[in-house]
Amino acid sequence: MKITFLGAGSSVFVRNVIGDCMLTEGLHDGCYSLYDIDAQRLNDSYNMLVNINANSNNNRAVFERYVGVENLEAALRNSDFVINAIQVGGYEPCTVTDFEVPKKYGLRQTIADTLGVGGVFRALRTIPVMEMFAEKMEKVCPNALFLNYSNPMGILTGYMLRHTNVKTVGLCHSVQKCVRELFEGIGMTETENIQWKIAGINHMAWLLEIMEDGKDLYPEIKQRSLQGYPKGDKVRHEIMQRFGYYVTESSEHNAEYMPYFIKRNAPELIEKLDIPLDEYPRRCIRHINEWTTMRKELTENPTLTHKKSVEYAANIIGAHVTNMPFKFGGNVINNGLISNLPPEACVEVACIADRSGITPTYVGALPEQCAALNRTNINVQLLAIQAAKTRRKEDVYHAVMLDPHTAGELTLEEITNMCDELFEKHKDWMPEYK
């Protein structure tokens, strides 16, 4: 069993995913191929995993290291599973550019990695690299399953599924954390008898039902919510009170997926709803500053062990190997799974993994208000995918013009000028658009 991790210099995430794999039935003695373009970060991850392997897995796993594009094909050869967690352009210069240029036009963002102008240009930088991955996989491991963790999830996973021959599923951790975060915020306890159903699109999937022993918990949840929105999660609670359903991804993300919260003509909402503008750059700086201490703890600790995380990848791969079914929230092409969303959209629904592969489950129609909100985001995703394929500036303009938050703040001329400036700033990181 060979599992390749692309972007293995991301040590904390590698620890969760590959560490989980080493603790999963059928994967203890796997061959783990680690690939990155940064040799130092790759070696850090390797040293960390060697210690975990010794202390938590009786040294049963084998690790290989591959650095640089010239070694990509070797890293992928004969892989059974490929896990992707790359970021193209890093914090500097690309993330800084994705925030600073829109800010000049009066467009403020929180995370900018999934939707909006930041998400679109992140996708345009990343898709050419994904195309390279797909080309190599089709050549040296054509039957491998590609597990995508990189954002923007809906655009990247949708592109892989529609425009390559690589078997792909997109994974996030917002589904499995949704109910826990909701309950913690309002002082409820998640018991073994809690049953829930979630479907929609990545970062905007809906908690459609939540039951305990057949009792609908939504009335109690909404009543508790009205007693005071939890600090740090006020946007999601406002969405739930207004539209009827709790959404999977965090408040800082959803604040920029809709046109209601970051408003120049309603600045009081920023403080009222605890909206953390420029959150992602702050987070990046904090992680960079913390890495020196964390690096020593992770890579120079000979007693390092690991306990399984909430990430799905290891259980999905384990289900393929053992044929013990595993249910998870996965991102797949809709094709009628959610009847009131476009068939070509990338949707997030319950899926079953076993030896036969990934089988998504049928949902039917979402509540119309939820589907309508999803469609506003899908519009951007589909046009961004089209733009990455055609490499036409006009398609990029259209994608950003249809973004709900951007459209609510800027004129069409401002959007076009902003995109042109981003094309120029990012020209070393993406193909030419005409």
Image (cartoon, grey):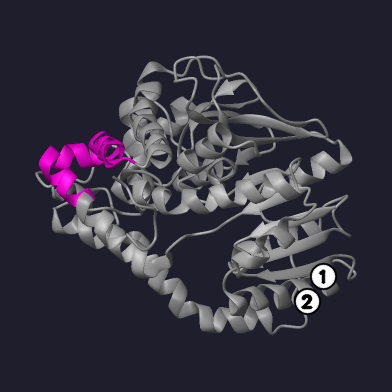
Along the horizontal axis of the image, is 34 left or right of 280? right
The percent coordinates of residue 307 (x first, y second) are: 74, 62
> Within 10 Å of the Cα at label 1, are there few (<14), some (14-19), or many (20+) other Cα atoms?
many
Along the horizontal axis of the image, is 316 left or right of 296? right
Asked whether residue 220 appears in the rendered view, the answer is yes
> Within 10 Å of the Cα at label 2, are there few (<14), some (14-19), or many (20+) other Cα atoms?
many
Residues under numbered marks 2 and 1 in contact, where contact means CB atoms less than 8 Å apart: yes
User: Which residue is found at the position 42% from the left and 18% from the top?
Assistant: 367
Q: Does the stretch in magenta take in 410?
A: yes
Distance of label 2 from label 1 (alpha carbons): 5 Å
Image quarter where the C terminus lies is top left
The residue under label 2 is 51
The percent coordinates of residue 113 (x first, y second) are: 40, 52
User: Which residue is found at the position 68% from the left and 48% from the top?
Assistant: 137
**Residue 154 vs residue 142, the one in the foreground:** 142
Instruction: Give the quarter of the image for residue 241.
Output: top left
Disc 1 element: helix
Vertical arrangement, residue 406 with respect to residue 283, above or below: above
**Residue 191 vs residue 251, the one in the foreground:** 251
Asked whether residue 308 appears in the rendered view, the answer is no
**Magenta residue span:** 392-419
The percent coordinates of residue 243 (x first, y second) are: 34, 26
The residue under label 1 is 53
Q: Does the stretch in magenta take in 280?
A: no
Vertical arrangement, residue 383 with respect to residue 312, above or below: above
